[in-house]
Image (tube, rainbow, N blue to C red):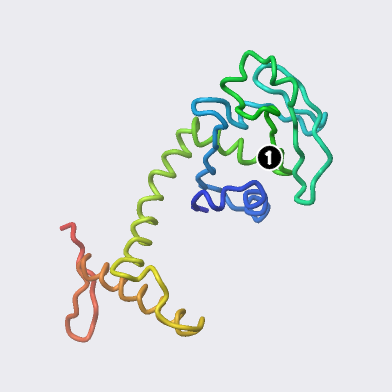
Amino acid sequence: MLADAAYGTGQARQRLQAAGHTLIVKPPPLRQAVPGGFTVDDFTADAVASTVTCPAGHVVVLGRPQVSGARIAQFKKRCTTCPLRARCATSTTGRNINVHPHHDLPAAARRQAATDSAWQADYRRWRPPVERGVAWLVAHGNRRLRYLGALKNNAWLHTRAAALNLRTLVNLGLTRTDDAWTLVSAVA
């Protein structure tokens, strides 16, 4: 399954993998608390021990699960005298790390996207045609829906997609001869 970063969350990845899909999903980007500093992937979360270890080696116990299932590791005073503070946190109360129930899935996806040449080749192979198709679909003011109601907009979308497919076939050499349509190969 090819998808953009919106489908790269841990919960979405877990559901798609459980459904038997092979994922070529761009992982969501990480934000750094400090430019050029550490990200959540630089911290080691241990779900079994319920701890998080920071890049400086400080170990903190995860807090109670929140409604969303996430647990927070609060480093608080450990950050005050930490030699890596300038690369880690700007907050006066120290760094907090949110560990979601599927924390390991996006982290593994980011590692795969950075190191797996087969994944990178598949992503480079399939992403441009998908983006091109979306660009054709929304070109010339077609980014917004034209009608009120799902039925009319669904009909418009299918008509637009059919017209774009027909244009592609004509550009590939589709011609009409004697009551039949034939696709003349561009390669002779």
| Left/right of residue 20 with respect to residue 149 in the rendered view | right
Q: Residue furthest front?
A: 92
Q: Which residue is drawn at 78% across and 25% down?
A: 60
Image coordinates for residue 78, horizontal then vertical, percent:
74, 20
Q: Quadrant of the C terminus?
A: bottom left
Image coordinates for residue 71, horizontal then vertical, percent:
77, 40
Q: Residue at x 49, y 32 (%)?
A: 114
Image coordinates for residue 179, horizontal then vertical, percent:
21, 86
Q: Residue at x 67, y 37 (%)?
A: 104
With respect to residue 88, does 6 lie above or below? below
| Left/right of residue 154 with respect to residue 74 in the rendered view | left
Task: Identify the element where label 1 is drawn.
Answer: loop
With respect to residue 79, does 160 lie above or below? below
Tag 1: amino acid: His
Image coordinates for residue 32, horizontal then vertical, percent:
55, 32
Q: Residue at x 46, y 37 (%)?
A: 118
Q: Mark 1 points at which residue?
A: 103
| Left/right of residue 105 with respect to residue 146 in the rendered view | right
The image quadrant that residue 77 belongs to is top right
Residue nearest the viewer, comparing 23 with 149: 149
Question: Mark 1, residues whose alpha carbon is within 10 Å: few (<14), some, or many (≥20)?
Answer: some
With respect to residue 18, does 45 lie above or below? above
Residue nearest the viewer, comparing 124 with 110: 110
